[in-house]
Image (tube, grey):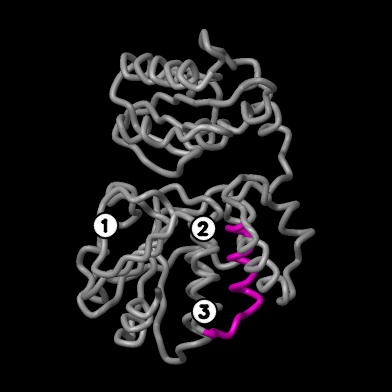
Amino acid sequence: MFEAVLKEIRDHDTIILHRHHHPDGDALGSQIGLRHLILRNFPGKRVYMVGDEAGRYAFMAGSVMDEVDDTLYPRALAVILDTSARALISDERYQQAHRTVRLDHHLFVEKIADVEVDDSSYESCCGLVTGMAMECGWALTPEAATALYTGMVTDSGRFRYDATTARTFRLAAWLMEQPIDTEKLYHDLYAMDLKELRLRAAFVGRIRLTERGVAYTITTAEELAALDCDSFTASRGMVGVMADVRGVDIWVNFTETDRGILCELRSGPYNINPIAVKYGGGGHAKASGATLKSWDEVHSMLDDLDKMMGGNA
């Protein structure tokens, strides 16, 4: 499965790792983890990471991105991690690279790279990278193990989501043979300061329900400014406040920005990905996103979700 990826790594002395905008733990974890794996198992390689800032995941060791000169790309291998569509890639210079590879676990949207390994049966891109390391017999380091474990934890919802399988635990067990400080890791991941706690409380108070019980929150640009938080925190960071409401099987968060209305769409039992794709988005079967063009599209999406609930009643 990974032979073509290995060949590209062997053939290039310079490797530049990309991932999606506004990184989560899985995007950063796969980026940081793969960097350490390549440096440990392919001595002499130069490995760089590029993209926007780590945001709330800046606690992860090695999460500061590199300054990479344009002149490195024509002879480099660009590896794109945890990204289903071109528009989501942070730093478009991957297009200037000599060769490109993609490692991803999202549902397929479009071909991006010369070599593609896209396996949506993995709970996380970090799980995919870990599986590659095990299959290839690579030596593991504590730094790589910690980063990859972080991504597995975050994208599996602490091993709660149904994408979690026996393989997930086998891969996690292999990583935990390294000295991972899980107490510190979980504290960094889930501890909230008072401002964030109050923000979550504010979003809980904004939850609405459609006729058939789809939960949603709407934040206009004016309301976003009043909340004193960035759009990523308000959208992806707050969609989870609806996750454990009894009787709610689909929940969605809409956030108005100057780039459009960000939509974070989630479900427990239903595959909501086709609806995200209908509106130009993508992701996973039960966790997807899109950027909508208007409030009319917001209402249209809510109607589509209501119909899904009605069809599965």
Q: Residue at x 53, y 36 (%)?
A: 233
Sequence order check, earlier mark of 1 and 3: 1
292 over 35 or under it: above or below: above
- Residue 144 in the magenta stretch? The answer is yes
- Residue bounds of the magenta highlight: 137-152
264 over 13 or under it: above or below: above
Residue 133, how many percent across, how many down?
52, 77
Residue 304, how many percent across, how many down?
39, 19
Where does label 2 land, which residue?
A: 122
Label 3 sits on a secondary structure element that is helix
Q: Label 2 vs label 3: CA separation?
A: 15 Å
What amino acid is labelled 1 in the image?
Glu
Instruction: State which quadrant residue 245 falls in.
Output: top right
146 over 21 or under it: above or below: below
Q: Label 1 vs label 3: CA separation?
A: 30 Å
Q: Quadrant of the N terminus?
A: bottom left
Report the magenta stretch's main SS: helix
Instruction: State which quadrant residue 291 falls in.
Output: top left
Where does label 3 land, which residue?
A: 135
Give neighbour class at mark 1: few <14, some 14-19, many 20+ (Cα, 10 Å). Answer: few
Q: Nearer the viewer, residue 27 or 193?
A: 27
What amino acid is labelled 2 in the image?
Tyr
Sequence order check, earlier mark of 1 and 2: 1
Task: In the displayed orientation, state which residue is furthest to the right.
Answer: 183
Q: Label 1 vs label 2: CA separation?
A: 26 Å
What amino acid is labelled 3 in the image?
Glu
Mark 1 vs mark 3: in front: 3
Label 1 sits on a secondary structure element that is helix
Tell whether 222 sits left or right of 234: left
Which mark identifies residue 13?
A: none
Where does label 1 land, which residue?
A: 92
Q: Residue at x 27, y 51 (%)?
A: 86
